[in-house]
Image: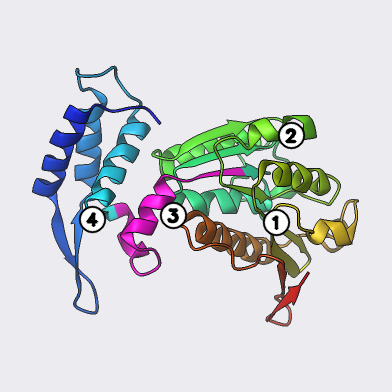
Amino acid sequence: MAAFSAVNDAHLEERIRALTQTARLADGRELPVLPFFFVQDLARALARSRTREKHPRGQAVAHVERVALALGVCPERYLRNHDAYSLVEQLRLLESGAALVGLGGLGGYVLELLARAGVGRVRAADGDEFVPTNLNRQLYATRRSLGGYKAAAAAARLRLVNPAVDFEPMAVYLEEADMLKFFQGAQLCLDALGGLADRAALLRQAGQAGLPVVTAGVAGASGFVATVLPGEKGPADYFGAGAGAEDSQGTPAPAVATAASLMAAEALSVLCGRGPRLAGKMLVFDLNQMSFETLTL
């Protein structure tokens, strides 16, 4: 993130206090809130400040949100996160970073959820392009995006959803030799790869980097989600390498979205400071049976 001057921050804190309003929650509690368009106005003024070189608009918005949260004021964008994440946890999310491998079915939904929750930095890699068979489940696959890079579609979407996210898309197939560099600045890796062939390499390099890996897979109406701590075994170690059952059973949208939501929930738990809930475990679901079971790895 870009540096902002102490003079600007002192003035910014003053302006935030002056513009803060009170939101009354359904249970009668009151919460200090900085309205959305005031955040935009403050960021616009900060971005064109003459005390420092100009800053990209998204960085300025993120800075305003972080300063507000540090003052105990909730940016309106995150108001409906109340009780899910404290203001301290929300600030941790804005200051956190994640590395996401894959921007297809799982990765697209995961990215969307992390961005809306307020994760500050996401670096994502996917060298694939959209094809018509992606339309059944992949969030960023549309008639207009067919034939285009998934990374480019993800970047365009995030500019609309939450430009304050420092998003670094890479339209490449990540090689094992490049993974350690890819992980720099992240506190967590998200494995949204298809199949099983490349997952062992991802676990090895994430372990070397000291990062937990939130991983998932889908086949038909069923799927799994797990968190692999550095040096521990994950589902890929038991399933082996190959295309995976998804090729024979398909990947319908409800199962993909379910797995991605569970991945995002686990990632947010780690990034906000609560720690993993699925470390050494695998949550298995079957939407045909509406069953969820947690197994120990």
What kind of element bears circle 4?
A: loop
Q: Looking at the picture, which amino acid does disc 3 mark?
A: Ala
Circle 2 packing at 10 Å, graded few (<14), some (14-19), many (20+), is some
Q: Nearer the viewer, mark 4 or mark 3?
A: 4
Q: Looking at the picture, which amino acid does disc 4 mark?
A: Gly
**Residue 288 seen in the figure:** yes
Query: Separation of disc 4 and disc 2 at Cα?
Result: 40 Å
Which disc number belongs to residue 124? none
Res 29 quadrant in image: bottom left
Which disc number belongs to residue 174? 2
Query: Separation of disc 4 and disc 3 at Cα?
Result: 18 Å
Query: Separation of disc 3 and disc 2 at Cα?
Result: 26 Å
Q: Nearer the viewer, mark 4 or mark 2?
A: 4
Q: Which residues are magenta?
A: 77-99
Which disc number belongs to residue 215? 1
Which disc number belongs to residue 117? 3
Circle 3 packing at 10 Å, graded few (<14), some (14-19), many (20+), is many
Which disc number belongs to residue 72? 4
What kind of element bears circle 3?
A: helix
Would residue 117 appear left or right of 86 to someone viewing this image? right
Q: Looking at the picture, which amino acid does disc 2 mark?
A: Leu
What kind of element bears circle 1?
A: strand
